[in-house]
Image: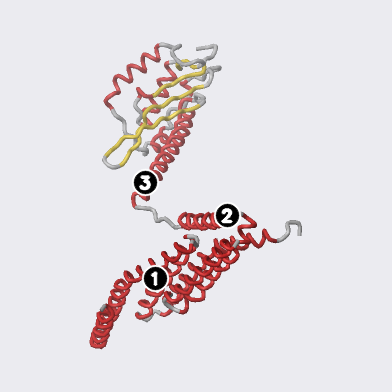
Amino acid sequence: MIAWLSDWLRDIIAVILLAAFVELLLPNKAMLRYARLVIGLLILLTIMSPILRLLQGDFNAKLKDGITHWDQLEVKREVKMPTLSDIQKKAEQLNEKQESDAAALMEQTLESAMKSAVTKQTGQQVEAVDVTLSWEKQGQKMTPSLESVLVSLPEPDEQKKPADAPSSTGDEVQEVTAVQVDINDVDVQSDAGEAAKKQDDPNGGQDGWVQANAEVGKEIRNLLAEGWAVNPGSIQIRQRAGSSN
Amino acid sequence: MEIIQIVGLGLIATILIIVVREQKPLFAFLLAAFTGLFIFIFLIGKIDSVITVLEDLADRSGIPSIYLKTILKIIGIAYIVEFGAQIVRDAGQESIASRIEFAGKVLILVMAVPIISVIVETVMGLLPAGG
């Protein structure tokens, strides 16, 4: 009992000595009040320590936990300035996203334009036009070029004669030629050959799809090749498999 | 005798500043700031021995090291704030100096938050639960 009492008293005396020392060390009076508050709390804690220990076990550990937790919070809260490389990385990501968005938008516009043009020019109902763009590096910038066009025609019921289609409305097509599309002309021959082969084989398509008949196919192909300067070899035209083909 | 060196340095710096101030007030300020910095750095090493004594005291009495850490942090903040505010005040920017001191006060109070929370928790624990 006496030992415990002397321990406690020693603690209190040490903390008070410490406080006196600190007050001497403090450089100016303005800080004194604030420092005194904290030191007073510490002294209070020391004096109360027997009660605290009785009530809630090891309060020192708790205090330590609290302080370390607080320190960590402060570290986390520190504003981190992004470094230059971070910013550049972000900019690159944004650029890529923007480019892909632009490409998607371009594909969509091209698809709808081609669809309406084909419908208008040939009178053929078009189910969907699928445009795939490929990106080519030219110097610093990536430039898009039309890689392939897939035209899907609906099931041929009463096929309109292609001759019905008005062939004089070339001006619409002229407008859209403003879209600059790079085409690598090297593969034209081989692609055209492949396409011709595919066309010869009417059942070569996927399930439910067959190659469109040659006449319509050729017309659409010519139209797209003229209007958008698409490589004729990279145009695929398919048709829903129907009874008559 | 370091005290002679420091006082001598201070006197020389003061005379130089008085001489220069008429012609170039900017240089006078720079001289004052530099002298203050020099004395501060010169003496900050001496405080080391005082802190060693404090640590020794804390060790021997067995008070938790977290107390000493908190107290030393308070002293450090107080010194740094005092030093910075004094230089700014020399340059004539009283308002900025008081802001620096304000920041120091806030940071010292932040030190007290964990201690206060422990005490408050204890007092709450003392109260009867159903009361």
Instruction: Using the image, tell me which numbered label, if any, was put on residue A58.
Output: 2
Q: Which residue is drawn at 28% across and 83% down?
A: B7
Q: Are marks 3 and 1 on the same chain?
A: no
The residue marked by circle 3 belongs to what chain? A
Q: Residue at x 56, y 55 (%)?
A: A62
The residue marked by circle 1 belongs to what chain? B
Where residue B77 appears, x then y in whole percent? 43, 69
Where residue A194 appears, x then y in whole percent? 34, 17
- Point out the residue furthest to the front here: A2
Q: Are marks 2 and 1 on the same chain?
A: no
Please tell me whether mark 2 or mark 1 is closer to you in this view: 2
Where residue A172 appears, x then y in whole percent? 43, 35
Q: Which tag, 2 or 3, sits closer to the chain's start?
A: 2
Please tell me whether mark 3 or mark 1 is closer to you in this view: 1
Total marks shown come to 3
Q: In this view, does A224 lie above or below B115?
A: above
Q: Which residue is drawn at 41% across and 43% down?
A: A98
**Front residue of B1 and B113:** B1
Question: According to the image, label 1 marks what residue?
Answer: B80
Where residue A244 appears, x then y in whole percent? 53, 12
Amino acid marked by disc 2:
Asp
Question: According to the image, label 3 marks what residue?
Answer: A89
Amino acid marked by disc 1:
Ile
Find the distance from the CA under tag 3 to the CA under tag 1. Answer: 38 Å
